[in-house]
Image: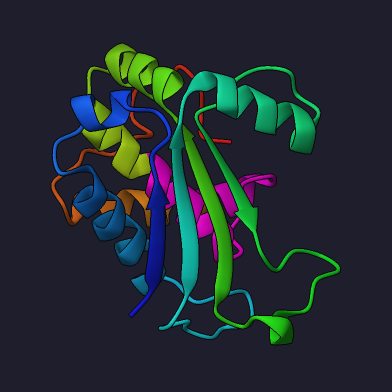
Amino acid sequence: MASIDIVVPCRKWAHSVPDLERLCRRFVLAALAATEDTAGRAVPDAELRIALTDDGGARDLNRRFRGIDKATNVLSFPAHGPGTRRDADPQGLGDIMVAFETTAREANAQGVTTADHLAHLLVHGALHLRGHDHERAADAEIMEALETDILARFGIADPYRGTFAERPS
């Protein structure tokens, strides 16, 4: 079973999303179960961390790691990117950060609950940790189809129908 460490430095999350930690675990586990890593292996004992922060924290991370000086909805930091060794920590997948204000604003613009949008962003982030990407159109189609399928299992509508305030990063 995956080990998921959840930190919530932004208290607004707990006031806006009922059963917050359960939601986080449920959707990240669903994404991990639906995918294999880039080497085609399942990672049953995966370890990852989720940070539910605010826009200030997201902006800082986005600026430091992507060179973009603005808040974003979700960031993923895979533990095993280019130049890292998987054998040093084969279970470690990485970190997912989700920003409250951007997520809440996008949810409102899309006419969905903050909880449903958070679920989508967590699935999106977990897929990044498993090696999925959306830089090329063909890869984006695969990733979006996985996201849509995973969310549909929980009764959440296709997040790619309609207009997005900002597609997940």
Say left or right for 137 vs 13. right
Q: Quadrant of residue 44?
A: bottom left
Q: Is residue 25 visible?
A: yes
For the magenta stretch, what is the residue range? 121-142
Who's the residue at 51% across and 41% down the image?
Answer: 97
Say left or right for 64 vs 133. right
Say left or right for 107 vs 139. left
Q: Foreground residue, 74 or 41?
A: 74
Who's the residue at 86% across and 68% down the image?
Answer: 83
Locate residue 123, reporting x and y percent. Answer: 39, 51
Q: Quadrant of the C terminus?
A: top right
Who's the residue at 51% across and 29% down the image?
Answer: 167
Locate residue 67, reporting x and y percent. Answer: 81, 28
Who's the residue at 31% across and 33% down the image?
Answer: 117
Looking at the image, residue 165 lies above or below residue 18: above
Question: Magenta-highlighted stretch: main secondary structure?
Answer: helix
Is 24 a magenta residue?
no
